[in-house]
Image (cartoon, rainbow, N blue to C red):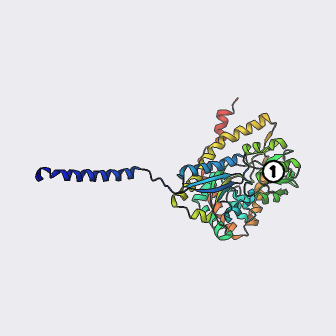
Amino acid sequence: MTEHNAPVPARRGFLKAAAVGGVGAAVLATPNVSRAQTVTWRFQSTWPQRDIFHEFAGDFVSRVNAMAGGRLRMELLAAGAVVGAFQLIDAVSAGTLDGGHGVSAYWFGKNKAFSLFGTPPAWFYDANSYLAWFYYGGGEALYNELISQVLRVNVVGFQTGPMPTQPLGWFKNPVQNAEQLRGLKYRTVGLATDLFNALGAAVTALPGGEIVPALERGVIDGAEFNNPSSDRVLGFPDVAKNYMIQSYHQNTETFEVLLNKPKYDALPAELKAIIRHSAEAASADMSWKQQLRYPNDLQQMAATQGVNVQVTPRPVLEAQLRAWDGVIRNLESDPFFKKVTDSQREWCRRVSAFYLRYQASPALAYNHFFARG
């Protein structure tokens, strides 16, 4: 009897082992979903609620929230919800805000080198070339040196979102020559303030939401912000009708995502990776989305709002380039500023030369296919 039943315990042992193995396989096949409590961060943009830039900030936030698996949630706030646009970096550094979305040029008053990160002189091929320098040409290390060693602000930052060349801006009367800029009360930010001061303008730095009221009241005579979609929704066509496109004052610009350093450093590696890769993904998405929105809004302003769209005359563009020479020469008396500009020039001299030689002219192809009668 014992011999007859001997295989039974062995079979039971096999089934037990198989059951244990099955549980192990199930564990391995189940996604590693964290049950940690959600951390909520207040993340403020430097843009008005209705501006497409605030939408771009939301695109970054939505990617973080979608990929963080419930462990981190960013709550998006518009400019002024907690602090004014120009106070964002101090609020993030102090921990009053956990993070924010803006441009490095807004911190130009702390150190003029800040404007080199996102609004450099007009030597980059385009804004994607700037981002390539930042992430592959040594720019990020220099940016971190500025933040942590020169200024000692308590933030972590990422550059994201390549912008096309900005317009010269909005004027009551068209700008026909560089002499018309002398004495003109003009709004811009960052290194462009030094550039327009060199051209004889009287420059006022204003955040996005304050520009149109200042133009309407005559506090300023002309202004640039950034792009047709922002300009249209902010109301520029209601107070000025001459829109001058093309300029070298901000030939390339990118956004900046700022985070409070102690809170960022406390995150696990996978959440830090999600934030970095969300900035990259939002950067790509923005470069595609703007191709839908910007041309449509420019066309609508011209067709339905009486906006006179004009290309900035070449003599004005040439005067800007000459003015850049003097601005750069003056500011390179600061060793750190020169350290950054030397790095940027080395990149641009090599990379821009490649693309200018390597790519066929888009204007030639466009004229062939679309400009014929």
* Outermost residue, top side: 373
Residue 274 picture quarter: bottom right
Tag 1: residue type?
Ile
Label tally: 1
* Outermost residue, front side: 1
Residue 207 picture quarter: bottom right
Q: Position of residue 325 (x, y in %)?
A: 75, 60
Q: Position of residue 319 (x, y in %)?
A: 79, 54
Q: Position of residue 6 (x, y in %)?
A: 15, 52
Vertical order, 315 against 270 (above or below): above
Q: Is residue 83 left or right of residue 64?
A: right
Per the image, the residue denoted by label 1 is: 211
* Residue under the image location 70 percent in, 39 percent down: 295
Looking at the picture, tell me which residue is in the foreground, 106 or 70: 70
Q: Position of residue 132 (x, y in %)?
A: 60, 55
Q: Is residue 281 left or right of residue 53?
A: left
Vertical order, 366 against 122 (above or below): above
Few, some or many residues within 10 Å of mark 1 (<14, 14–19, 20+): many
Looking at the picture, tell me which residue is in the foreground, 6 or 317: 6
Residue 199 showing in the rendered view: no
* Residue under the image location 52 percent in, 52 percent down: 69
